[in-house]
Amino acid sequence: MAYSSEEHSGSQSDDVLENSSSIAKEKSGKSEVRLGGRKCKKKSKCWLYFQEYHAKDGGRRARCKQYGDLYACGSGSNGATNLNKYITSKCKKYRPPNNDPRQTFLAKQTNLDGSGSTLATPRYSAEECRHALAEMLILDELPFRFVENRGFCEFCFTMNPRFDVPSRRIIIRDLYKLYVEERIKLKQYFKSSQVRVCLTTDTWTLIQNINYMVVTTHFIDCDWKLQKRILSFSQITDHRGDSIGRCIEKVLLDWGIDKIFTITMDNATATATAIGYMIRKLNSWHVDGVIFEGKYLHLRCGAHILNLIVSDGLKDLHESVVAIPNTVKYVKSSLSRLAKFKNVLNKRSWGIMLLLC
């Protein structure tokens, strides 16, 4: 337990009770408030691990960012002596940083393609860490509140105590900033390369009767690598061909794309109307907007066709398909019935069937 110079004469048990009481009161929001106004910059390294608070009794306290414990921080200019002693002698989570600026560290860094590793001098950048964190949330499809999970925060503190994990609101702003940057880069690429792209569209309706449409592009970049980008995810009024065509037109105008190779869509009746609408628009934008006068512009989606085939086939087997889950439900509805069923499987050596139970 840490003590201030004014509290040094008290017993250790009294300070434990005082700190425990301060923590309980602070959690209720009644005894302490955050410091307001302009703050002077603190030079001590310990303030990387503590947050300063003022108590209503006039005393100064420092809250550990890792565990939330309160410690007295003295009456000096910064009151850091007591906190530094806690970090160096008692805190098992943190370690004091290297004080010798001439000391160089080497770390083994794995190549992005996994081909090998090299020795390099690690460099810390808070901006790069936040950028990498935003990319991780996108690639792994994680929720925004992930950055506030206790386990993730402890992991970041262990990896590098200097990294201040952003809140959910801050990471949302970082994600939007990253989106704007990547959008500008992609628009500049389309403008400079004049590449011919392929589009894929899909529409669906939610149970709330709200219609949505997504437009995805595939293209070959300058390095002859296949690229995929989602250009639009928007709400549409209906599934008519003219509405779909106007939505695609708006997306192409927004991104500055005027040359299309194919558009992959389903084989619905409205699709033919949308394709005819796009052929007229592309020919008016660019003399080479479509190839072969749009004869091969419409590419039928194989996934939709396969889904129709499977759906029609399942209609003939509907009674048998429905009977399977009903049978499983019947067996599991009674513990005695389930025990008899497992006993029969064991006698017949049908161990694989036990997985269904």
Image: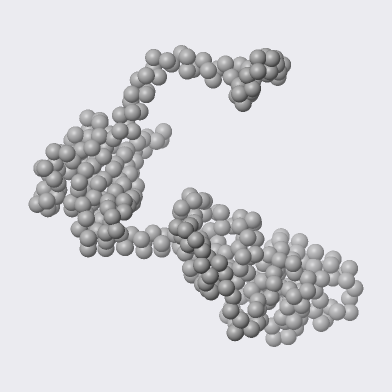
Determine if residue 40 is in view: no
Between 101 and 35, which is closer to the camera in this rendering? Answer: 101
Residue 309 in picture, x, y percent from top left: 33, 24
- Relative side of 274 to 9, left or right: left
Residue 249 in picture, x, y percent from top left: 21, 48
Identify the residue shown where x is 80% and y is 68%: 19
Does 127 appear above or below 258?
Answer: below
Quarter of the picture containing the N terminus is: bottom right
- Relative side of 246 to 27, left or right: left
Does 54 appear above or below 214?
Answer: below
Location of residue 245 (image quadrant):
top left
Between 70 and 174, which is closer to the camera in this rendering? Answer: 174
Location of residue 353 (image quadrant):
top right
Between 108 and 306, which is closer to the camera in this rendering? Answer: 108
Identify the residue shown where x is 61% and y is 55%: 149
Residue 33 in picture, x, y percent from top left: 67, 70
Identify the residue shown where x is 42% and y is 15%: 317
Residue 211 in picture, x, y percent from top left: 34, 38
Identify the residue shown where x is 75% and y is 75%: 88
Quarter of the picture containing the C terminus is: top right
* Residue that sits furthest to the bottom in the current view: 77
